[in-house]
Image (spheres, grey):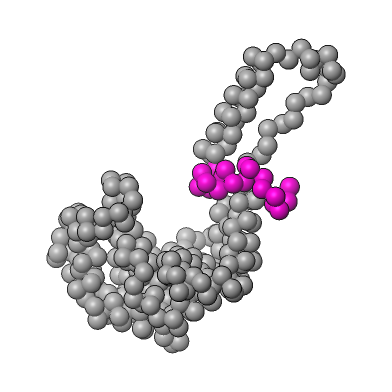
């Protein structure tokens, strides 16, 4: 690309040196007033802080949902509580930036990112309780999924393409949280949404499928095969395991998907 693109329109600022009540209040104030471009920028800034602080919290405690109240003792808890206190602002982002037909693509992306950063911590609650919104998320998440980029593909060459890809990604994340609700989940399994998502995941896995070790050279005939001792066999096995571990470490996919790809399950083409 001839120029660098940013979801927020320009690079996000560094985190404030002290994330206290005054800093959080100032950021929420930027989200409420001013030109829409600046408000979207503030939403991305707040979302990026939430993402970073939640990642730090996960690194410290492991599963962050085993004891949700523990977050209140960390920066991520302060951020989330401040957003909860601004209920009208949160509702406005949902209604005007995500649900409204008049919302621009920039508003949708900023709003979805902020909602996902919050609901990744809070899990299933408003606005995912609104069926109409969940249907919209499904449309954004699955629409064009058969042609959607996977990890390792070239990034979009236009800002429009970048924003559409981001909207699809954030919508998919929110949809995943919504489908944890049994009522939604039971309905969705009977729609084309699940096959579409499975097909996309299969395509992503196959793109990064580890290359199988080269077959043993056949030269030497049966005499050579018979001469292979148990020690050399175990050495070969260890070598294959080491190669697979190296491939897994270098792969951009999560270990579980790497293992699934290496297993060559029935139905996956060679």
Q: Does the magenta stretch include residue 154?
A: no
Query: Which image quadrant for residue 213?
Result: top right
Q: Which of 218 and 89 is in front in this view?
A: 218
Query: Is residue 48 in sight in this rendering?
Result: no
Query: Which image quadrant for residue 32?
Result: bottom left
Q: The N terminus is located in which quarter? A: bottom right
Name the residue: 85% across, 18% down. Answer: 221
Prevalent SS, magenta region: loop
Query: Which image quadrant for residue 17?
Result: bottom left
Q: Which of 225 and 22 is in front in this view?
A: 225
As drawn, which residue projects farthest toward the right?
221
Residue 121 is situated, as x and y percent measured from the top left of the image, at 32, 62
Q: Give the vertical position of 29 relative to 1 (above or below).
A: below
Q: In this view, does 103 lie to the left or right of 35?
A: right
Name the residue: 32% across, 47% down. Answer: 62
Name the residue: 24% across, 81% down. Answer: 88
Q: Give the vertical position of 203 relative to 111 (above or below).
A: above
Residue 236 is situated, as x and y percent measured from the top left of the image, at 65, 22
Q: Is residue 214 left or right of residue 25?
A: right
Segment colored magenta: 251-270
Q: In this view, does 76 lie to the left or right of 120?
A: left
Query: Is residue 256 in sight in this rendering?
Result: yes
Count of numbered marks? 0
Residue 66 is situated, as x and y percent measured from the top left of the image, at 30, 54
Name the residue: 51% across, 72% down. Answer: 186
Q: Does the magenta stretch include residue 253?
A: yes
């Amino acid at each position: 690309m001839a120029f660098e693109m940013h979801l927020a329109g320009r690079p996000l600022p560094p985190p404030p040196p002290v994330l206290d009540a005054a800093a959080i209040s100032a950021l929420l104030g930027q989200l409420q007033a001013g030109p829409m471009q600046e408000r979207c920028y503030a939403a991305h800034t707040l979302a990026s802080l939430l993402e970073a602080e939640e990642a730090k919290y996960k690194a410290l405690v492991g599963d962050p949902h085993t004891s949700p109240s523990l977050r209140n003792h960390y920066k991520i808890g302060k951020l989330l509580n401040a957003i909860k206190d601004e209920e009208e602002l949160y509702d406005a982002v949902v209604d005007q930036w995500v649900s409204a037909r008049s919302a621009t693509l920039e508003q949708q992306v900023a709003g979805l990112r902020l909602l996902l950063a919050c609901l990744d911590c809070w899990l299933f609650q408003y606005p995912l309780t609104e069926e109409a919104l969940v249907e919209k998320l499904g449309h954004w998440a699955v629409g064009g999924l058969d042609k959607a980029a996977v990890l390792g593909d070239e990034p979009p060459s236009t800002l429009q393409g970048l924003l559409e890809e981001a909207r699809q990604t954030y919508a998919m994340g929110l949809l995943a949280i919504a489908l944890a609700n049994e009522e939604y989940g039971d309905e969705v399994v009977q729609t084309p949404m699940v096959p579409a998502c499975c097909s996309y995941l299969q395509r992503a896995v196959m793109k990064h499928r580890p290359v199988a070790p080269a077959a043993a050279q056949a030269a030497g005939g049966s005499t050579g095969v018979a001469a292979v001792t148990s020690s050399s066999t175990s050495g070969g096995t260890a070598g294959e395991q080491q190669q697979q571990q190296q491939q897994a470490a270098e792969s951009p996919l999560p270990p579980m998907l790497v293992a699934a790809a290496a297993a060559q399950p029935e139905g996956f083409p060679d």
